[in-house]
Image (cartoon, rainbow, N blue to C red):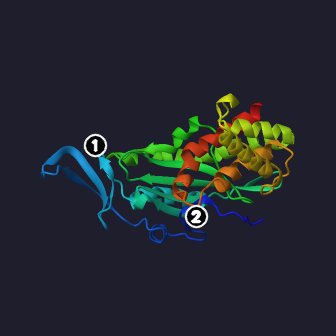
Amino acid sequence: MISQLTSLDERAGVDLTGEQSLDNVLERSNLNFDVEKVPIHTPEGNEVTGKYLLRRTDNNFVLGTCGNRYHIVDNKSMFEPFDSIVQSTGAVYESAGLLSHGKTCWVSARLGDDFKVRDDAFQRRVIMLVYHNGLQRNSYFGYNNRVICNNMMASLNIASRKHGIGVKHTPKWEDSLNLAVEAFKESIRESSEFAENISTLARVKMSKLQAARFALKFFNDFKPIKSKTRTDRSRTRNHNKVEQLIHLFEEGMGNEGKTRYDMFNAVTEYLDHRSVGKKANTGRRFISNLNGLQANKKRRVVQELLTV
């Protein structure tokens, strides 16, 4: 079934379905730019020792700052290893894009071994993030996509995320290439773990009352609820969000309102599509679903649903 909801990566970047050439990937997604490291000067014109600006060479846009040890790795050099693994594993490019004029760049590819839970088809994907902000390491991650609603399901094992963060901006960045290979292997392994966990959720019944109680806990970050400290406006707003989540539990994309799996799908649909404001930065939300707050929320929901 073709989803009626647009995926976050499609909203944030460029659809690369059918693309095979890395050069075309970089050109179509505006990732074919270089970055340079230039000295920082005081207003009086004096050079600041050991401090540099990172900026694009094509338009001089400043992406961040760095120190002496920081080594620039341009997009093509970073994505070429990713491309070689894509080709060797039979993966196909899905999307690519950039945030904040190039502070964060990504390319994603779809692996071929899809799986199903209930009647839902899931696609396994891998993604590489390249940072030019002077702060973060380049990263490889695996995630799953529920086709019917285009929800992103990040890896569930938080500790294994370390496998996806391995390429520092140093002169010896190529020495970390083996971590990219391990990240691909880990993403496949974790997809199997993910499939097992949510298959378990699909077998455990959940009533509407239980769903309402869980929704209350979710919107309170699974902390004890202290109703006395809340204003009437806060309680009303929270009640409306709970009602929305229950509605998604029962009538969300592909949901039946019968199991904990339906609740997990309700949460992911809410986070990926229903809670996103018109003015929200879709790109940042996309990255958050990979290794930020949104991903952590989904992991916590799975943990809670597996244990309650």
- Residue at (75, 60) in percent of width and height: 148
In the picture of the structure, the residue carrying the numbered disc 2 is 11
Please report the residue visible at 54 percent of the width from the left and 60 percent of the height from the top.
279
Dot 1, crowdedness within 10 Å: few (<14), some or many (≥20)? few
In the rendering, at what x and y percent does residue 95 appear?
56, 63
Q: Residues within 10 Å of mark 2 (few under 14, many from 20)?
A: some
Near-viewer residue (231 or 295): 231
Above or below: residue 87 compared with residue 215:
below
Is residue 219 shown above or below 225? Answer: below
Q: Is residue 305 left or right of residue 43?
A: right
On-image quarter of the C terminus? top right
Secondary element type, mark 2? helix
- Which is more foreground, mark 1 or mark 2? 2
Q: Secondary structure at mark 1?
A: loop
Give the side of residue 4 with respect to residue 69, left or right: right
Picture quarter with the N terminus = bottom right
278 relative to 170, above or below:
below
Image quarter of residue 150: bottom right
Whichever of callouts 1 and 2 sits on the residue coming sooner in the sequence is 2
Q: How many marks?
A: 2
In the image, 163: left or right of 110?
Answer: left
Task: From the top left corner, tell me how far across and down residue 108 is, in percent.
Answer: 55, 58
Task: Establish if 249 lies above or below 86.
Answer: above
In terms of depth relative to the viewer, which is nearer, 239 or 123?
A: 239
Q: Is residue 200 visible?
A: no
Q: CA distance from mark 1 to mark 2?
A: 36 Å
Say what amino acid the circle numbered 2 marks. Answer: Arg
Q: Which residue is mark 1?
A: 69
